[in-house]
Amino acid sequence: MNILVIGATGAQGGSTARRLVGLGHAVSGFTRTGMGLPEGVKPAIGDLADASAVRAAFDGVTHASVLLPMVYEAPVVESYVRNIVAAATEAGVRRLVFNTGNRVPSGPTPVSAFETRRAAESVFAHSGVPTVVLRPPVYLDNLCAPWVAGPLVHAGVLAYPLPADVPVSWLSHGDLATATVAALTSPDLLSTTRLLALDLGGPDAVTGAELSAAFAAVLGRPVRYAAQDLGEFEAGLAHAFGPSTAEAIAGAYRWVAEKDRTLYGQNSAGLEDTLGVRLTRLHDWIASRPWKEIAR
């Protein structure tokens, strides 16, 4: 296999790229600068808006893992996806895995973080390229961010921008890589169809109170859950990523809180058998992290 990873410089795509390299696959990573790729990943330099650069990156590629950048302007996202599909079709890609970066509600919403990925999924579905769509919930690794880990370790407060009673089947980047590699390489996964869409999720779907209790059990001290104010959350994102991206991401959390509290709750029941993998239990993931060092 010759595998192209779009998004390999980020945490999600990087985890997948490292796993593929570790398994001995030839891996290239699409990047604007050639910088920040995991060790062993060959750079394919270009911009998703440049059709010729995308086509060059797909030259000789047999499989592709695609995670779009945090861009949520519909015309821009559509141009990215159509460039990818055209290049993958021309290269004769045998399988493409598209990570939506989020769950996608069953019906239309006004939230660009959902709708741009719904539209992208539709383009891939109608492309003729054999495609597996992976729709993850919320990532456990988000809890390692300083604004979460600091108060968690030093004050016993686990703050996250979801209501305390919303169940979430938290998924780690490591398990995302496990699922993505299986989706790319399992020989029989697309034996009877050219499109498979899967809602990813970890083995444990927990509320905020249950999540804080899991941390308390590992850390050996009381931990309480606090729903972070969404305006505060959006302001912090705007400082890091700009207001447009912040609005889209915060909008997804707001939608879940106000319209669909079940969206992130589906766990891995059946998923592990479909992909032939085993995913990490919540307690085990928490226990494997050096929280004092993370919170420094």
Image: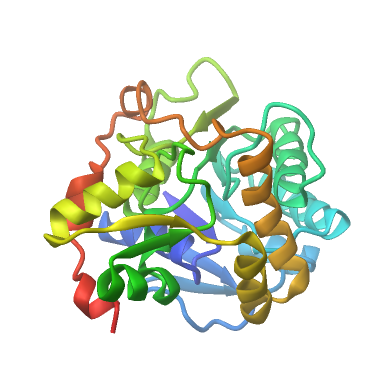
In the rendered image, residue 119, in percent from the top left (x then y), is placed at 78, 40
Identify the residue at image location x=61%, y=43%.
257
Q: Residue furthest top?
A: 192
- Foreground residue, 53 or 279? 279
| Residue at point 39%, 31% (across, down) | 267
Instruction: Point out the residue furthest to the right here.
Output: 75
90 or 154, which is in the foreground?
154
Q: Relative to residue 282, is residue 59 drawn left or right? A: right
Q: Is residue 114 left or right of residue 29?
A: right
**Could you tell whether 34 is left or right of 267 in the image?**
right
Residue 63 lies, in percent from the top left, at 51, 47
Name which quarter of the figure residue 150 lies in.
bottom left
**Residue 22 in view (yes/no):** yes
Q: Quadrant of the C terminus?
A: bottom left
Count of labels shown?
0
Q: Answer yes or no: is residue 39 visible.
A: no
Q: Position of residue 29 (x, y in %)?
A: 51, 67
The figure's colour scheme reads: rainbow
Whether 189 is drawn above or below 160: the answer is: above
The residue lying toward the viewer, choosing from 227 and 234, is 227
Residue 21, given in percent of the width and then of the height, sits at: 32, 61
Q: Is residue 184 left or right of residue 197?
A: left
